[in-house]
Image (tube, rainbow, N blue to C red):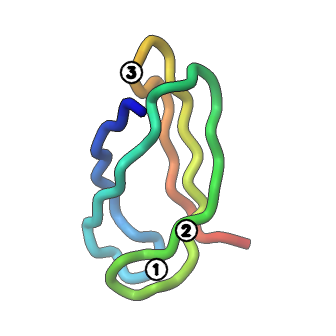
């Protein structure tokens, strides 16, 4: 599995955190991951094309 580290700001506590994203599949990936600082759920969504991130968002999970 090919992974890339992506840093972003938590939408709750505003700390900068990073997570590993799976780059082995092209297309849109979407899932919920807990913040490693405040433990609240973050909805991560990203699009990968040819092992590159072309779109990324980290929002408060609904």
Evaluate if marks 1 and 2 touch, with contact meaning CB atoms under 8 Å apart: yes
Percent position of residue 4, x then y: 31, 37
* Residue at image point 36% right, 77% down: 36
Horizontal arrangement in the rendering, residue 1 relative to residue 41 (left or right)? left
Q: Secondary structure at mark 2?
A: strand
Q: Are marks 3 and 1 in contact (CB under 8 Å)?
A: no
Would you name the residue on which mark 2 appears? 42
Q: Quadrant of the N terminus?
A: top left
Q: Residue at x 48, y 40 (%)?
A: 56
Point out the tag, 3 or 1, that comes first from the N-terminus.
Answer: 1
Disc 3 crowd rating (10 Å Cα; few below 14, some 14-19, many 20+) is few
SS under mark 3: strand
Nearer to me, 52 or 2:
2
Q: Which residue is mark 3?
A: 52
- The extreme bottom residue here reads 38
Alpha carbon separation for disc pair 3 and 2: 21 Å
Quarter of the C terminus within the rendering: bottom right
Residue 5 percent location from the top left of the image: 28, 45
Q: Which mark is residue 12?
A: 1
Residue at image position (50%, 56%) is 58
Q: Earlier in the sequence, mark 3 or mark 2?
A: 2
Look at 55% across and 54% down and name the residue there.
44
Q: Is residue 43 left or right of residue 34?
A: right
Left or right: where 19 falls relative to 43: left
Residue 17, x across and y down, in percent? 28, 65
**Element on which disc 1 rests:** loop
49 or 9, which is in the foreground? 49
Q: Position of residue 35 (x, y in %)?
A: 42, 75
- Which comes sooner in the sequence, label 1 or label 2? 1
In the displayed structure, 23 sits above or below 46; it is above
For disc 1, the neighbor class at 10 Å (few under 14, some 14 to 19, many from 20) is: some
Residue at the top extreme?
A: 50
């Amino acid at each position: 599995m090919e992974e890339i580290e992506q840093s972003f700001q938590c939408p709750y506590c505003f700390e900068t955190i990073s997570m590993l994203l799976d780059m082995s599949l092209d297309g849109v990936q979407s899932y919920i991951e807990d913040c490693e600082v405040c433990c609240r759920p973050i909805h991560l969504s990203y699009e990968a094309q040819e092992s590159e991130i072309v779109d990324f968002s980290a929002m408060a999970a609904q």
